[in-house]
Amino acid sequence: MIGVVPVALFAVVTWQVAVHGTLARLDERAGRALAGRGPAPLAELLADLGNLQVALPVLAAALAYAVWRGRRCAALYAGLAMGLVPAVVVPLKVLVDRVGPLTAETGYYPSGHTATALVAYGGAALVLHRRRLMPVAVLLTMATGIGLVLRGYHWPLDVLGSACLFGPVLLSVGYAARR
């Protein structure tokens, strides 16, 4: 039941972005106001938290540890969740074809970096069975989204859309990790 709200929000956000509705226009106005704000090196560092080269080794280490500890199913589900990121995000980027904040290029919705951060850091916390790591995972994912918006790499709704899309996936991984 808890996963219904993010999926419904994802549907509304995607619809608004696709039809360039009122919410998308407000989002672009906010994105333009935020792009370039804050210290650029820090914003770049935060945005880089969603890079595969940064996030994937964290998840890989957690998966290896989980397998070593006998939590093979949890590791499998978290690995599959990471595999879903490009399988779902890339077709959506092509379908929605959204222009980026500081470019005329398209393919910015939803944010793959946000999805990568959410699944990698959240998945790592879940398969490690460490509740105290989940706030760290949330913080790293939020930091990634903030960095992406401040650097002008994504609109705020790109980040929110990814979080709403992959939040329920992560809930499923958590459910599988507890079993």
Image: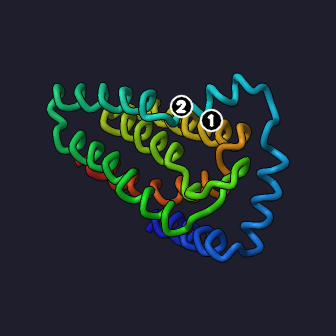
Q: Which of the 4 image quadrants contains residue 125?
A: top left
- Name the residue at the top extreme: 41
Rendered residue at 55%/39% (across/down): 141
- Residue 128 at x, y percent in the picture: 32, 31
Query: Relative to 128, is 154 on the left or the right?
Result: right
| Residue 4 or residue 80, whichever sits in front | 80
Query: Relative to 115, is 19 on the left or the right?
Result: right
Rendered residue at 21%/44% (across/down): 76
Q: Work out which quarter of the rendered image holds the N terminus and state it.
A: bottom left
* Residues packed near mark 2 inside 10 Å, few (<14), some (14 to 19) or many (20 plus): many
Query: Which element type, helix, strand or loop, lies under badge 1?
Result: helix
- Residue 87 at x, y percent in the picture: 35, 56
Q: Which of the 4 image quadrants contains residue 16?
A: bottom right
- Residue 82 at x, y percent in the picture: 34, 45
Query: Which element type, helix, strand or loop, lies under badge 2?
Result: loop
Rendered residue at 72%/75% (across/down): 21
Q: In the drawing, what numbered circle is on residue 49? A: 2
Q: Which residue is mark 1?
A: 143
Rendered residue at 80%/44% (across/down): 34
Q: Label 1, label 2: how many angstroms apart (C-alpha)?
A: 8 Å
- Residue 115 at x, y percent in the picture: 48, 48
Question: Callout 2, which amino acid?
Answer: Leu
Foreground tag (1 vs 2): 2
Any part of residue 134 in sight: yes
